[in-house]
Image: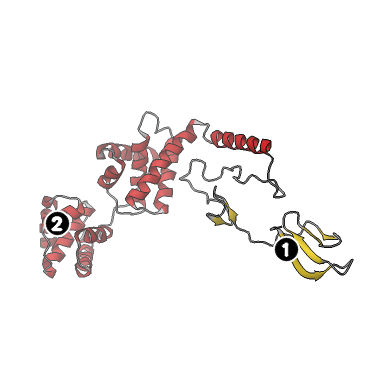
Amino acid sequence: MVNEVRTKEKCPRCGKGKVVTDNNTGETFCGDCGFVMTDKIQEIGPEWRSFSKEEHEGRSRTGVPTSLAMHDMGLATIIGPTDKDATGKPLSASMKSTIERLRTWDSRSQVHEPVDRNFRQAFSELDRLKDKLGVGDAVIEKSAYIYRKALEKGLVRGRSISALIASALYAACRDTETPRTLKDIGNASNIKRKDIARCYRLLIRELGLKMPVVDPVKCVARIASKAGLSEKTKRKAMKILKQAEEQKISAGKDPMGLAAAALYVACVMNGENKTQRDVAEAAGVTEVTIRNRYKGLKVSLQL
């Protein structure tokens, strides 16, 4: 058998047969006379096993890690896909159909409550936004935490689940200082920017969230890569923004507009051939904003 291991050791009783270890029953016995030396031996094989439906895919030591972005936090148990009993023997046809029926009811019973159905819908949308926006796991976990708090306070009732999960994601991006704008999240979720902003204000007010001010320096890399600017220009823009922050002229200004203006100033100083329109399109702001910020930076920093 596959689950039997034969060793070179001889049987202590008959002295002829080889010692055989059965991994299913946990017994060590003689291959000739059948003398059982030990039973219930400790598992000596590898710890990993498959937690997915395919037997040899996704092998690991444990199951899926717990996560707030799952409707059951990854704590629900499932009836395994292998149709074998505890000793590794295949199940009979009647038992196989019984287990299959139990498996179906087990999966159905996990989303029985309305709250679970709400979470499942919201977090499947969150998973889609994660792929579209390219944000990290930390941002997704924070989004799920904010959404759970909103549901706890009854803020979801009478409002769109999609709009509320999108606003929770924007709040998480602001909190973790990930440079994603309302426009980006609106485009990814196909929801109006105004609706997301309304839900975001509601979350801030009702949950008492304190959001840090976005650092314009963190927006530079994103705009520069979109506009195809050089590393030299990018570093110059960062230096300009740091000077602006020291002189307190960046307060109250849109971080994306300020970063775009600093990049345009750096382009002019380094002789890089980029127009205001090129930088504005990459930043998602208007040319007028760049002109106004450009004038302010030029006068204040005497460039």
Residue at image location 12% in from the left, 54% down from the top: 277
Q: Amino acid at mark 1?
A: Val
Tag 2, which secondary structure? helix
The crowd level at tag 1 (other Cα within 10 Å; few <14, some 14-19, many 20+) is: few
**Going by the picture, which residue comes out furthest to the top?**
158
Q: Give the position of the C terminus as an image quadrant.
A: bottom left
Q: Quadrant of residue 221?
A: bottom left
Quadrant assignment, res 298? bottom left
Q: Which quadrant: the N terminus? A: bottom right
Please give the residue where the numbered disc 2 appears in the rendered image.
Answer: 278
Locate residue 40 relative to residue 232 in the image: left or right. Answer: right
Count of number-bearing discs = 2
Alpha-carbon distance for marks 1 and 2? Answer: 70 Å
Above or below, 171 relative to 105: below
Q: Amino acid at mark 2?
A: Asp
Mark 1 vs 2, N-terminal side: 1
Q: Which residue is mark 1?
A: 5
Badge 2, how many Cα within 10 Å: few under 14, some, many 20+? some
Residue 111, image x and y in percent? Answer: 51, 34
Residue 105 lies, in percent from the top left, at 58, 33
Residue 22 position in % (x across, y down)? 75, 58
Residue located 56% across and 45% down the image: 75
Q: Nearer the viewer, mark 1 or mark 2?
A: 1
